[in-house]
Amino acid sequence: MLDTCLAVQLKRAASLLIEDMDRLLEVLKRRAFEHKLTPTIGRSHGIHAEPVTFGLKLAFAFAEFERCRARLIAAQEEIATCAISGAVGTFANVDPRVEAYVADKLGLKIEPISTQVIPRDRHAMFFATLGVVASSIERLATEIRHLQRTEVLEVEEYFSPGQKGSSAMPHKRNPVLTENLTGLARMVRAYVTPALENVALWHERDISHSSVERYIGPDATVTLDFALARLSGVIDKLVVYPERMQKNLDRMGGLVHSQRVLLALTQAGAAREDAYRMVQRNAMRVWESDGRLSLLELLKNDPEVAALIPAEQLEESFDLGYHLKHVDTVFERVFGR
């Protein structure tokens, strides 16, 4: 019966987490459409890659948390089972109809076969799902923390009047909420391993799992509930700096358009290795100048490049809008029409 009570509690906790997720999804969708066409730099390995939009970043998070919501629903379904089957699961001293009656009254399914306890692989899956949700929270929190760095400063956590960033340095505006979310995510994930180890009980039961579940049940669910609510608040009030995004896009002298020039050269008849060499030798000069040189101007003055692509076509290869032409398609895939 204790297992059945635990199932009720975890089912209820999952319902609250799903409600938290719905609020987060609502905020992410609103902010994604707000910045659907706000251009920013995409980064791979932390280095400037090609242009994206900030709305796409938020749409990516929306899709991720929509998957998390589906996983929570599945985990809730899996954990919500009832077992009242006697000392070793044979119903020797209790009629199966008692189990069916209780399950119906509590809104649970009947556990098809149990020992003295409900199989703990169900609980392991439940807590593993919480761990995955926590990792998604940390991924988005880490994105915001990186974008708030002074040398980047494309977004910033809301900083209220009179708030202190540092007791020693009055100028500081630290990403304390997303740092906190990173720590909370680590705690939720820490509860996954004990849940996995609880699966291997002796024979028809021992109680090695019960002391663990008394801790991880309330702690993991309450912590994740708080984290989801906090992340919703962060996204809702997130300060976005489109001008700084554009400035960062422009700061490396057009290097973000190098792939399009590479493709234009191959379409003009150059072998790919030759095209790569032509673009890279000019791109490295821009890189080493810290963006003070212009890739477009260097390419225009490169005889080998100019012999294949006229200046007007080169200029077309530096059109920012080219990279954003399928944003609507991506948004329709994520949010529907």
Image (cartoon, rainbow, N blue to C red):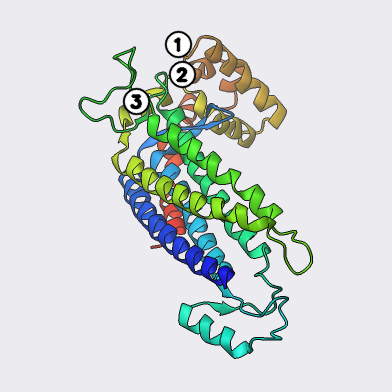
Other residues around mark 1 within 10 Å, as few (<14) / some (14–19) / many (≥20):
few
Please report contact status of discs 1 and 2: CB closer than 8 Å, yes or no.
yes
In the image, 134: left or right of 114? Answer: left
Q: Nearer the viewer, residue 199 or 255?
A: 199
The percent position of residue 183, horizontal first and vertical second, equals: 50, 36
Task: Give the Cα separation between the discs numbered 2 and 3.
Answer: 15 Å
Q: Quadrant of residue 40?
A: top left
Which residue is the site of mark 2? 253
Q: Quadrant of the N terminus?
A: bottom right
Q: Residue at x 55, y 27 (%)?
A: 46
Judging from the image, what secondary structure is the residue with disc 3 in?
A: helix
Relative to 150, is 93 above or below? below
Q: Nearer the viewer, residue 184 or 270?
A: 184
Task: Give the Cα separation between the discs numbered 1 and 2.
Answer: 6 Å
The percent position of residue 269, horizontal first and vertical second, equals: 66, 33
Other residues around mark 3 within 10 Å, as few (<14) / some (14–19) / many (≥20):
some
Which residue is the site of mark 3? 244
Say what amino acid the circle numbered 2 marks: Gly
Q: Which mark is residue 292?
A: 1
Q: Which mark is residue 41?
A: none
The percent position of residue 232, horizontal first and vertical second, equals: 36, 47
- Of the two numbered discs 3 and 1 in the rendering, the one whose residue sits closer to the viewer: 3
Q: Quadrant of residue 124?
A: bottom right
State whether residue 194 appears in this view.
Answer: yes
Q: Earlier in the sequence, mark 1 or mark 2?
A: 2
In the image, 165: left or right of 121? Answer: left
Relative to 129, is 244 above or below? above
The percent position of residue 94, horizontal first and vertical second, equals: 64, 86
State whether residue 319 appears in this view.
Answer: no
Please report contact status of discs 2 and 3: CB closer than 8 Å, yes or no.
no
Say what amino acid the circle numbered 3 marks: Arg
Farthest residue to the left: give it. Answer: 161
